[in-house]
Amino acid sequence: MKSYDHHAVETKWQKVWLKKELGRANDAAKSEKCYILVEFPYPSGDGLHVGHVRSYTALDAVARKSRMQGKNVLFPMGWDAFGLPTENYALKTGIDPRVATKKNVDTFRSQMQRLGISFDWSREVNTTDPTYYRWTQWIFLQLLKHGLAYQATIPISWCPKDKTGLANEEVVGGKCERCGTPVERRLQKQWMLKITAYADRLLKDLDTVNYEERIKTQQVNWIGKSEGAEITFTIGDHDVTVFTTRPDTLFGATYLVLSPEHPLVNEITTPEQKNDVVTYQKKVANKSDLERQSLDKEKTGVFTGAYAVNPVNNENIPVWIADYVLMGYGTGAIMAVPAHDERDYEFAMKFQLPIRQVIRGTDEQKDVAYSGDGIVMNSGSFDGMQSREAKKKIVESLGDTAKLSVNYKLRDWVFSRQHYWGEPIPVVHCEKCGIVPVPEDQLPVELPMVEKYQPSGTGESPLAAIADWVNTVCPTCGNPAKRETDTMPNWAGSSWYFLRYTDPANTKEFASKKKLKHWLPVDLYNGGMEHTTLHLLYSRFWHKFLFDHGFVPTAEPYQRRVSHGIVLAADGRKMSKSFGNVVNPDELVEKFGADSVRLYEMFMGPFADMIPWDPQGIVGMRRFLQRVWNVAERVDAETSIADERAMNRTIMLISKGVDQLGFNVAVSEFMKWSNTWKEGEKVSRKEFEVFLKLLSPFAPHLAEELWSQLGNKTLVSLERWPTYDESLTKAADAKIAVQVNGKLRGTLVLPAGTEQEIVASNAMKLDNVKKFMTGEPRKTIFVKDRLINFVL
Ligand code: ANZ
Ligand code: ZN
């Protein structure tokens, strides 16, 4: 018997697939198109991670199955190659990031090929390629043209280690997403993208796509739509407007709180309070929003000395400043209702401010602020009303002083970075003309070669130091001008890469209308949960913008979005070099073969779950494949299919397994099936061929090899996916005799294999059985599929 030499088998078929361009998508095919996308990686110096392998093999199984079903599949891969690690590497070694990127990309590509992933290699894209980022810059210019890109000096999160500004999304738990350093606040001129202009549509259109529920929920919460009202109070000669989601509690407002940065603070503060107010402002100036809003932190604040008039009852209430009110949300000022808001309650308790209950809850009242709905009280003519109804009524009663309003948590996207290794922002600053976009026919603005990659730390990009690049002429007036030296964040290139795959070599447009129309939307998109409020949201925003201006044919880029669970180390921790617990896929592929690695990663658990690595798991998979290899020797054309019903059922389970991303279920079906082939017995060729076709998306090399060993001249990867007969997928019926005390009293027809409990409960319902069941059975005799006997 030929032994299972995975090296020989795998390299042989990988060559064949590459040569025959198994993965090649057809832009003009009439068959149903199917665009399957997996997030392209950042090609780091570490090579592929077993986490990458999990999602690539899973999506490869879907792509391979779809191809076998006769669909025209687009399953592309590329490189999201701008970013800090490569720049840091350049900083440390002096090696040009272009050189490092090329090396890393080559490693990633060959690793993917060694896993037998059937990507369409003719469509590879690389975000750092000038022919690619030319279009990233072009899209930026369209955003600029339509007022969605602008410069603003704002307090931003600043990472003191990476020496760069960060977007809200890049700050996780008050720390820099990349390096974990606590972020600081810093005033800096930044390029911003007005994603907030799309807040409502980004929210509403979630109803039109099929995303996993957890993904939708995260986006909904991130966009954070709040419906409420703006109400204006007067403070002496000044007006101050607050945003509240609970205008129904206006009679319970016993003080106002302004954010310490609110522009009115200086105007209204009394001379006696000036000192305290200024000291407090200084104290909180550098705190992050997260720190300021932390619930377990003791509330702090200072009285301004001023009083405001509550428009609903002309009551004078004190005005305070406190850091729990943020300048960047709503109007930067609140009406405090300590009886019904927990933060206000804590604050009022600490500073002995009055608390007035204005809503009676339907539930039992707790001692802390009741924040639910209920019946209005202590509110003049509104008493007795349902609080929900009172919201509108109170706002209406105030005329011009109040209006309903909507607020979003979503902030505009901080779009500039003070780094070298990113797309240059294609504008020129001219003293006479201001900000001038680089003419489209002069794109790309290429990154110049530099000697030093070091960020200056002054807030300027290293590009600022390259005088002959920075100094240019104004495209409008021809006078000397300076190039913008900030670069784009690494989220730029990935915001539209899926469009480029449809037409990667186009030099006239980012992709032709025809090809976009053929392929969009992406039918299935897999990526990490950590990208839900970053890349996934950003790319939906760009796509909607491009849609509005007629550049893409669909309002949403992705029809279905799913997310894989993280692969943890065997010790249950995150895999990390510093813990020394990283599993290297190359070593596993070498030792057990790509098919074993693929199967194990599919089998390890439900695709969406976080799963710790089990070193034994892969050994089991290798053993299973060896068993299949051995069976091939006993395949016989004369032998008939062992169990048609079982086979139909298995085809169904495996097909659904792939469609519903239940890969682990599918793999266990293969194992069950292989266990029905007894040692030394012949196996039906017809049955085994069906088995190989089904196995092919999971363990494609072995399936291809055994298929050819059977004498087939075709590729199993291009065979038709087996279909099943629905009626044969159900278990056969069994006729069951029902006895009481050994005498036949009825019969039941139930699916074969029905368990005792279910048979018993059905039997008890038969009239004739009821009649003879004069007491509780002392004993029940059960023979599966044949008989049940109640002994009284
Ligand atoms: C009075 C009130 C009474 C409130 C009550 C709540 C409960 P969301 O749902 O997150 O939008 N608020 C408004 N602007 C704020 C700011 N800049 N900084 C901190 N807090 C702010 O929350 C809206 C509520 O958060 C608003 O409604 C306001 O407090 C507070 F029983 O107004 B509420
Ligand atoms: Zn000019």
Image: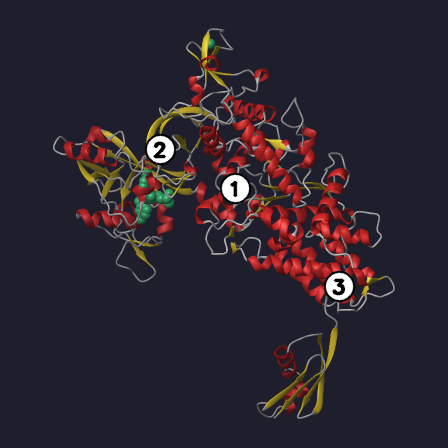
Q: Earlier in the sequence, mark 3 or mark 1?
A: 1
Q: Is residue 687 above or below residue 168?
A: below
Q: Residue 160, which numbered label?
A: 2
178 with respect to 621 (left or right): left
Kindly identify which residue carries mark 3.
Answer: 647
Q: Is residue 120 above or below residue 3?
A: above
Tell me residue 183's x, y (percent): 35, 37
Which residue is at the front of the view, 309 or 411?
Answer: 411
Quadrant where the N terminus sits is bottom right
Q: Residue 216, which numbered label?
A: none
Asked whether the viewer can see residue 636, the reply is yes
* Amino acid type, mark 3: Met
Separation of marks 3 and 1 at Cα, in angstroms: 44 Å
Which residue is at the front of the view, 45 or 544?
Answer: 45
Separation of marks 3 and 2 at Cα, in angstroms: 62 Å
Tell me residue 72's x, y (percent): 73, 41
564 with respect to 186 (left or right): right
Q: Earlier in the sequence, mark 1 or mark 2?
A: 2
738 with respect to 352 (left or right): right
Asked whether the viewer can see residue 662, the reply is no
Kindly identify which residue carries mark 1.
Answer: 204
Disc 1: residue Cβ within 8 A of ligand 1's nearest atom: no
* Amino acid type, mark 1: Lys
